[in-house]
Image (cartoon, rainbow, N blue to C red):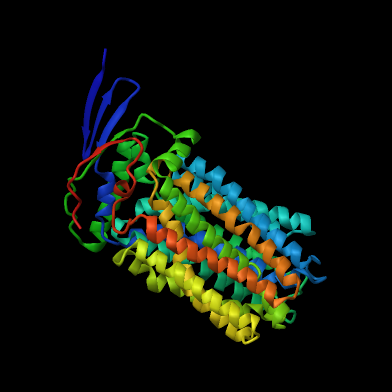
Amino acid sequence: MRRRRLCIEGTVECIRVRTSMAISSTNVPFRLDRLPWSRWHWTAVAGLGVTWILDGLEVTSVGTIGARLQERDGLSLTAAQIGYAATAYLIGAVAGALAFGYLTDRFGRKKLFLVTLVWYLMLTIATAFSWNFMSFAVFRCLTGMGIGGEYAAINSAIDELIPARYRGTADLCVNGTWWFGTMLGSAASLALLDPHVVDQRFGWRLIFGLGASLAAAILFIRSTLPESPRWLMLRGRNDEAERIVATIEKQIIRQHGVTLAPVEQRITLDASRQHTSPAAVARTMLLTYPSRTLVACTLMSAQAFLYNAIFFTESLVLTTFFGVSAGKVGFYIFPFALGNLLGPFLLGHLFDVIGRKIMISLSYALSGILLIATGLLFVHHVLDARTITIAWSIVFFFASAGASAAYLTVSEIFPLEIRATAIAIVFAIGTLAGGALAPTLFGILIATHSVTAVFNGYLVGAAAMLAAAVTELTIGVEAARRPLEEVAPPIGSLRTSRRRPPA
């Protein structure tokens, strides 16, 4: 005998059919999307977006100290070992993304974005106490696990909290702050790698303390952020989702003096499923959305190869081919990072206004073409340390916007139930296919002292970016200014009312 219970609480209606099935109707996602940009959104972005700053700082730390680690005051590593350590970091990021990504979808965004931040904090401190190559590589791998877990937890949380019409701009700017971490790391290296300022037995170790300090400072802000209301509604916890959204609305009304229009659009869900199995994740990505999976993996692989190939080994190129001293590498990384930072900030709005497909394709194609031109100038010995830095800055002005949009794309085009897991899987595929090999490969190419060998590596990166541009243009998904539930309906959705929320 069927058992029915009807409960109406505020804006949430719940109809429970049988004891094993929970059908709920809610307007929570559309209330979040109709909010004006506010101080609350700035707080959320600041608390969650630090992930990218930390990763940029970590990558820069190894990039700037790469030459120092080869010296006796470092760990006496070879150029190849530095490449291996960078690969270990990326492998750790892959493992962390897969493990923590699955846990994020199962246990919630908030629990995991706190756990991953603490994990990172402890392991980056441990890296500072490395005593040989093996310990350094192991600690780098474990630190990468924390950062990989952050990617899955943070990208899913940010996109579920940001209104649809601002999602592209906000995501690109947040992802672009990776380069603020780079600038922070390069600026610190100028002082900490200067033997006149710090004893070089300890200078490179102190750089890792910067990330730990930043992570510790941001923990409080994160602890004040709520769980994703969208994740809660999938678990049938509509009362909690309703309270969180109502609290945000009251803050915005009180702080900004605005009147929020009523929302009539609703989505109906089967909230009886408490988690999605790995098999269901595979079916969704490979059978329901195969072309989306291909686009996401292509975009992620191309940008991963380009960035990890060039940036992880930038200091080696400068010191090997242009005679830049280890203590001066930061002077060249800083303007390079500035160009990368400006790309998403200046172009980000266009990804919402013009659209994802055109802007992603254009940014990938331009960066690939410009990299080929840079490689030609490099192989013909036209460039010096200053001009190659300028050339890299122009290339990555566009590449940075495209790479940031790749992470945005992955978090938009898959259903809410598997969002964090999908981000983790695509990140893992992209990193292993395009990123894990790149630092080791380029470390070996640079060790040959052959400009032709390095140029061939640049050609591979450019070809990957051009292929990704074509893939996005032909089968990419246009998600600009569209609700997440419209771009990819939840697996458990039964229906969505057709009336759109007010602009």
Residue at 48% from the left image edge and 69% from the top image edge: 399
Residue at 38% from the left image edge and 53% from the top image edge: 159
Residue at 54% from the left image edge and 69% from the top image edge: 462
The C terminus sits in image quarter: bottom left
In the displayed structure image, the side of residue 325 where residue 338 appears, left or right: left
Vertical comparison of 104 with 128: above or below: above
Can the viewer see residue 427?
yes
Quarter of the image where one finds residue 232: top left
Q: Position of residue 41 (x, y in %)?
A: 35, 59
Q: How many marks?
A: 0
Quarter of the image where one finds residue 90: bottom right
Q: Position of residue 302 (x, y in %)?
A: 53, 61
In the displayed structure image, the side of residue 414 where residue 131 appears, left or right: right
Vertical comparison of 248 with 207: above or below: above
In the displayed structure image, the side of residue 224 where residue 331 appears, left or right: right
Can the viewer see residue 224?
no
Q: Position of residue 128 (x, y in %)?
A: 70, 61
The N terminus sits in image quarter: top left
Q: Position of residue 409 (x, y in %)?
A: 41, 56
Residue at 31% from the left image edge and 46% from the top image edge: 485
Vertical comparison of 484 with 257: above or below: above
